[in-house]
Image (tube, grey):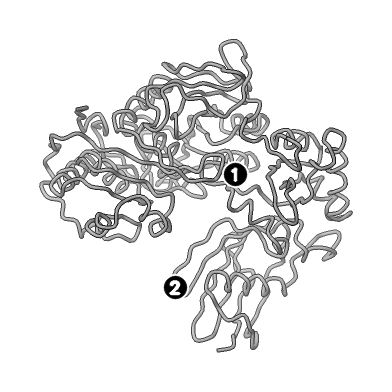
Amino acid sequence: MTRLELSQLVAETTTVCEGTLDATSLRRHIAAMARYVAYHGGGDWLLHEPDIFWFSVCLYGVTLGGGSITLLPDAHSTKQLAPSLISTDVMVRQVGLYFTNNQDHSSITLNDMDDESLPDIRPGIIIVLTSGSTGVRKQLSRYLHTFLEEASTLQGKWSLNDSIVTVSMVSHHHMYGLMFGVLWPLSCGARVLQAAPFPVPDISTLDNTVNRKICLISSPTYIHRASKSFALANLVDLYDHPVKIDRVFSAGSPLDNEKSSIVSKLLSCPVHEIYGSSETGAVATRRADIDSSWEALPGVDLQITEGRLTIQANYHAREVASKYLSSDLVESVGQSFKLVGRVDRVVKVEGKRVSLQEIENLVQQIECVESCTAKLHEDMRISVALAVVLTEKGLGILRSEGKQHVDRLLRHVLAESLEAVLVPRVIRYLGALPVNAQGKIDHGLLSAAFTEGARFLPSVLEVNRDVSSVRIKILIDPDLYVLDGHFQETAIVPGVALVHWAMRFAQAYLGVNPNVRRLINLKFMQVLHPLDQLDLSLAVSDSQLQTQYMRNGIICSKGIIELDA
């Protein structure tokens, strides 16, 4: 039995730092929860808890109490995942132990809060759900002591201590955010920001009187966005004292060299990229502003087998072999390696094989393209589809010459290197590539961008709903039909499109009657353009649909749509 002490998981600290987790309180809650779980026989738990304090209490408490805990990627996954994860009788018996953001934690009585003693039993396992590169969800499990081994490896490479506050911009329900945002900093005594800093780091709750430095746990999506702004360079604490970012971590997909350099210079600190997966944990690192090659972390053995990377680390998931053969194609660079593609992205179209990575590499070289991703698409026949984010120059060409002109430009370049059947038949120009919290392509949202009628609706970035209302974060893609010719110099969104979008989303998410009787007090207060990100709020009551569009907290349009009863 691997016996663990609380001090290994949550290091003792001598002082309290306002705005960060209180280590003493956290340890006592964890111990009480562990004793509670052990008393109730361990069992299988589901966990989705945005609050980082209670997340840590539940995660450690359940595991140290001998329970098995599965981290749900979002609160809506419960009904979908519960039947396949745990038996019905266990779910009924322990349904009160499932935590969500709305859970009343006082319903569980934690006694003896001054006692940090742990049950004398073997800790349970932690299960993380991952979609990998295929979009198919799978479960990967690890014992708690393997997470501590990984944390020790990271600590040996980058020393965190009491003088640093970690601020995580990524979900702690996935492996990267779990390790870098919670497990590692807690185990070494670093401070962990209590508030959830999304979408912009909110340091306003932090008392930084002693000038602690910030370690930012971020993603490629945020790093690329931050390279265009100075938001991270002007953070202030509870007392308006400037807060300095000391280092930045990023994982999920490789960073663009130029944008990594911009952020490094902007913040006067390094951006460390992490290579790894839910199967292996963190195994390699690089700084894209210095070198494009990756080097192994201490104690990790990396080898190249027939062009593929073989990984051996002591903290891999229980479901994979100790020598894990990844799907990444690499080439050796001295003691380091470079990523050159993935073996599982080779697809077949009408008997012809093509690497989707190769298509993306070709498109990426076109001057008007900022980023892109390719996928298989099945309509009348199987073909390649391409989602593209254009540069400012590319957007100018799209507005002045139209979508067909840009389509021809891209296809002409690809036709010089690919057989005709492999050239993408369907091309979408999006405001941003759909990615998840880890910066990887969200396959569900990507597929939605190519469904019939997708060019009539903006991209959906996030959805929060209840019985009678829904809040949707949308992005106005530059190739929507409603923007064609409206107007050529500066495209704007017509008001009728906003009404149409509201009705379509209300049908999809609230199931409202599609027949409109009349429009009441409909107002358009702001001009909307391509690439604008909006918050759409819809609420239905007594055959009336209330609509409101907001951009950066400012109301752009609102009104009431009266529906047939």
Give percent across and percent down for residue 211.
Answer: 40, 33
Which residue is tagged 2? 467
In this picture, residue 507 sits left or right of residue 207: right
In this picture, residue 258 sits left or right of residue 147: right
Secondary structure beneath label 1: loop
Q: Work out which quarter of the rendered image holds the N terminus and state it.
A: top left
* Mark 1 surroundings: few (<14), some (14-19) or many (≥20) residues within 10 A: some
Res 260 quadrant in image: top right
376 to 298, vertically: above or below: below
Give percent across and percent down for residue 420.
Answer: 85, 41
Residue at 30%, 30% (x, y): give it: 187
Please state which amino acid type lies under the numbered disc 1.
Ile
* Mark 2 surroundings: few (<14), some (14-19) or many (≥20) residues within 10 A: few
Tell which of 489 and 294 is nearer to you.
294
188 to 450, vertically: above or below: above
Q: Work out which quarter of the rendered image holds the C terminus and state it.
A: bottom right
278 to 339, vertically: above or below: below
Report the Cα–Cα distance between label 1 and label 2. Answer: 29 Å
Secondary structure beneath label 2: loop
523 to 532, vertically: above or below: below
Residue at 50%, 32% (x, y): give it: 249
Residue at 84%, 33% (x, y): give it: 417
Tell which of 436 and 305 is nearer to you.
305
Give percent across and percent down for residue 234.
Answer: 54, 42
Give percent across and percent down for residue 239.
Answer: 40, 46
The disc placed on residue 441 is 1
Residue at 59%, 44% (x, y): give it: 441
Res 264 quadrant in image: top right
Res 520 quadrant in image: bottom right
